[in-house]
Image: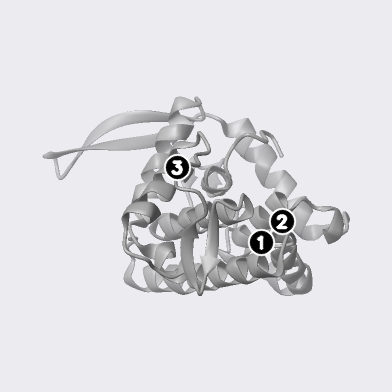
Amino acid sequence: MPDGSTSLPARLYLLAWDTTKLRLTGAARLAHLVRAGALTELAQRELLVDVEGIATPADLDARTGDLALDGLLELVEESMPRPWKTWVTQYARVTLDAVRAQLAADGLLRAGKKRVLGLFPSVEYALEGVQVAEALQQEVRQVIAGPVPVAEVSDRDAALAALAAAAGLRTVVTPEDQKRRRERIEALTERSGAAAPALRQIVREVRSAMIVAMTAATATGVGT
């Protein structure tokens, strides 16, 4: 992938950019996708573990150095215990905002000020790292299509491709691709949790909760 230091949620956000029209696709559902990516990465790093279905910090002092991931860790630590599926939607925009801020600090987004309804200050982001996003999208398409065997795909890249496919990001997968590559996408989902059976269950649960949340967001036309 273009930059191995970029977090999974940040990569998912970059994947959502239509680099031709320079606009986000599926913006109403994006917060849930980004949060699902953050939960998956923290589980893969063993910083969040499963305790009887509850997402639980493994070490209260552990941090990643990434704004979005550490923010979610702190949020989980300071909140009442919740299952994984709840965290896909709970305060999901907090993680999305942190991802945008981190990407802006890295020079991949440009932040500009605007006013909502002419009154309330807000921040509007534009894509600066067009080539980075395009390269990432191309590599994810290759992961989904093959020919590299799933067993040779890293668990991190497998998670990126599986979540992007589950979200139906048209920048990397068409509805026809989803049908044609269904078995491979399922295999990539399993590969995402290759480190342990418990992790595979976490990845499946997060993915399922994301699909439910994104479907609801699409129906209402708003994000969380």
Counting residues from the N terminus, which is met first, the one under dot 3 or under dot 2? 3
Which circle marks residue 162 in the picture? 1
Q: Decide: few, some or many residues near mark 3? Use Cα within 10 Å; few <14, some 14-19, many ≥20.
A: some
The three-letter amino acid code for the residue at tag 1 is Ala
Where residue 119 sits, quadrant-wise, is top left
Amino acid type at mark 3: Asp
Q: CA distance from mark 3 to mark 2?
A: 22 Å
Amino acid type of the residue that numbered disc 2 sits on in the rendered structure: Ala
Percent of width and height locating residue 14: 55, 43
Mark seen at residue 114: none
Pick the front one: 78 or 96? 78
SS for dot 1: helix
Q: Are marks 2 and 1 in contact (CB under 8 Å)?
A: yes
Q: Position of residue 43 (x, y in %)?
A: 58, 56
Disc number placed over residue 70 in the picture, else none = 3
Q: Position of residue 186 (x, y in %)?
A: 72, 71
Mark 2 — residue? Answer: 158
Q: Is residue 28 above or below residue 126?
A: below
Residue 206 shown left or right of residue 188 in the figure: left
The answer to whether 143 appears left or right of 23 in the picture is right
Give the CA distance from mark 2 to mark 1: 6 Å
Crowd band around label 2 with a 10 angstrom C-alpha radius: few (<14), some (14–19), many (20+): many
